[in-house]
Image (cartoon, rainbow, N blue to C red):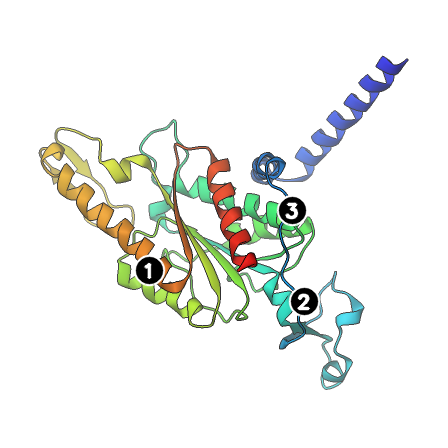
Amino acid sequence: MAADKHHSRHRDNHHRAEALAAKFPPLLVAAERVAATVAQGVHGRRRVGQGETFWQFRRYQQGDSARRIDWRQSAKSQPVYIRETEWAAAESVWLWRDASFSMDYRSSTKLPSKAERAKLLLPALASLLIRGGEHVALLGSGRPPTAGRAVLNHLAEAMEKVDDMTGLPAFEFLPRQGRIVLIGDFLSPLEEVEAAVSAFAARGVRGHLMQILDPAEETLPFSGRVRFQGMEGEQSVLIPRVESVREDYRRVFAGHHDGLAALARSLGWSFAVHHTDRPPETALLALFMALSVSVRN
């Protein structure tokens, strides 16, 4: 009898899992699996204190508590407004991923592209943050940070609509206690990266840079006569013997990496590199722990 009950519960769990997979896109199912794996090894986060410093008004959205409506502000016009305070902003994380063509690169069909890895990590991180009670939003989506599992669907839909091909995040005003996670290859010139991220840091936003690279981009393992084709409109380059330029290439690439790390340190941000031949869980854990440190500080 006990065995029958056990098998029955197992079947019920299996059916629920199948129902979840049917309800969400495959990307979100994969992201949830990655998040669940990391969540098993992560304990509770220390939450920030809840001060009441006023930040801004925003329009009421479905899911907001009626207790947060500012009736005086709402009486001035037709829309109903919510009064945002700094404590709500401090619990909010804005996410961004690079959608430029360079992210489509992969050196082997056995590896995911950088874009595929970024599209997996972003909702996986969102899922992990939501489990911890954080509010999450996609930078540039126009939606305020919200909590709850429905956010994942909104993120997936918003990611499909991203058409910014610059490779760097466009600036938007965020609260001074907000946090931002930027996921991309950051292969743009250092001065351009600095200009983009410094605009957020100047407002007191705490940030985290996750650079995603194909392992071949860092080591240039090719040999012989190779033609390199640019992925963003650059002219192709034919190199007769790749071995002859490998050391110089690695030195320049390492210099770019050091520049990114130094930039992050100067702003009080964190910086990490993730290679697409490594498990996504390692990158997700690094991001989550970096956010945990920013909350404690």
Which is more toward the observer, 225 or 222?
222
Q: Which mark is residue 286?
A: none
Which amino acid, mark 3?
Gly
Q: Quadrant of the N terminus?
A: top right
Please state if 271 lies on the left or on the right of 256 as rendered: right
Dot 3 surroundings within 10 Å: few (below 14), some, or many (20 or more)?
few
Where does residue 186 sit, x and y in percent of width and height? 34, 52
Q: CA distance from mark 1 to mark 2?
A: 30 Å
Dot 1 surroundings within 10 Å: few (below 14), some, or many (20 or more)?
many
- On the question of residue 228 being in view, the answer is yes
Q: Secondary structure at mark 3?
A: loop
Q: Quadrant of residue 62?
A: bottom right
Where does residue 270 sit, x and y in percent of width and height? 42, 54
Q: Secondary structure at mark 1?
A: helix
Residue visible at 13% across and 28% down in the picture: 224
Q: Which residue reaches farthest right?
A: 1
Q: Which mark is residue 44?
A: 3
Where does residue 77 sit, x and y in percent of width and height? 71, 83
Name the residue beneath numbered marker 2.
Answer: 50
Residue visible at 52% across and 69% down in the picture: 174
Q: CA distance from mark 1 to mark 3?
A: 30 Å
Residue visible at 55% across and 54% down in the picture: 158
Up-down relation of residue 27 to residue 7 (above or below): below
Name the residue beneath numbered marker 1.
Answer: 263
- The mark lying in front, picked from 1 and 2, is 2
Residue visible at 82% across and 19% down in the picture: 6
Which amino acid, mark 2?
Gln
Please state if 107 lies on the left or on the right of 63 as rendered: left
**Nearer the N terminus, badge 1 or badge 3?**
3
